[in-house]
Image (cartoon, helix red, strand yellow):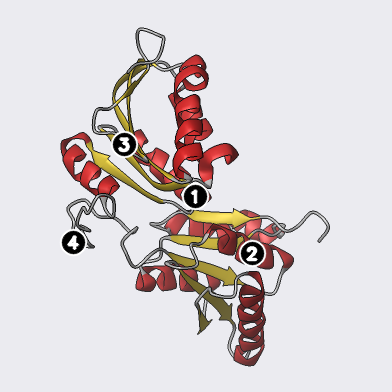
Amino acid sequence: EKSNNKMGYELMEQSHGKVFGVNCTGKITKEDYTTFLEPKLDALVAEHGSIRLLFKIAVFEGAELKALWHDTVVGVKHAKHFERVAVVGTKNWESGLVAVAKPFLKAKVRYFDVSEESIAWKWMNEGTEGVVDLGAAAPGAGPFSSTGRKFLVAIDGSPAASAALEHAITLMDVNEDQLHVLSVHAAGEDAAAAELLAAAAELAAKEAESVPVTVHNVEGDPARAILAQATELAADYIFIGSHSKTFVEKLVGSVSDNVLKGSICPVLVVPPPKDA
């Protein structure tokens, strides 16, 4: 089944039940989304409650696809209904779509090269109709394994850091993901840092009782310590609060700037609440 336009979305024949595959070809427009894809997603959600979406992007024209990706996957309407999202493609920016979407979804999200399409379908079908779980050793497996994601939140007692922690918790799957809270302190300030970590663990328990929290109390340079901890944990995300920059920070870069420059995983810089 195809959209009304000559080119656009095409329902893939492997689709079944709550597993929905879409082949994006030709020129993708907003009309394709509103007349074809959106009604399909609405119907699947109504029937199954949760859905799995495979997006194949092999050949397309036009510049609207990235915006439509946001409407489909990151948009508020269906984001909470996704269990798994797979992107199958051939270009670097397509894998970038996955990196953009991950922080906004509780779903498991992975990118597959077009040569791995069969692997992508196996991953989509895990746990449905008796399909065997591929496990962490599956080819192309990323950080979204059965052990869940690792969220690293750096705290310093500021309103922005508290907002970063709360934001991380809202994005977690409490049954699979892990929360790591890090406080980096100067020499002789380990007791104060420990108090911050205890308060953070209390906040996490208040926000979501079943979230497992691991605390890390480290002495040293903040940016370097955050990056080192992220590397040691193989963190999937780093959350950090933003602050107004001092004159020196404008010259040499703030902690968040330096973490952004040095990180190999996505970094979410969270501003303080407006009333802080």
Q: CA distance from mark 1 to mark 4?
A: 23 Å
Q: Is residue 120 above or below residue 91?
A: below
Labels 2 and 4: the sequence-earlier one = 4
Amino acid type of the residue tagged 1 in the rendering: Leu
- Determine the image quadrant of residue 120: top left
Q: CA distance from mark 1 to mark 3?
A: 21 Å
Image position, residue 240 (x, y; %): 58, 62
Q: Quadrant of the C terminus?
A: bottom right
Q: Is residue 35 left or right of 135 when viewed as pictured?
A: right
Mark 3: give few (<14), some (14-19) or many (20+) Cα within 10 Å.
Answer: few
* 195 vs 179, nearest the viewer: 179
Label number found at residue 137? 4
* 111 vs 76, nearest the viewer: 76
The residue sitting at 51% across, 32% down in the picture is 42
Q: CA distance from mark 3 to mark 4?
A: 23 Å
Q: CA distance from mark 2 to mark 4?
A: 32 Å
Residue highlighted by disc 2: 166
Q: Is residue 48 left or right of 55 when viewed as pictured?
A: right
State how many labels appear: 4
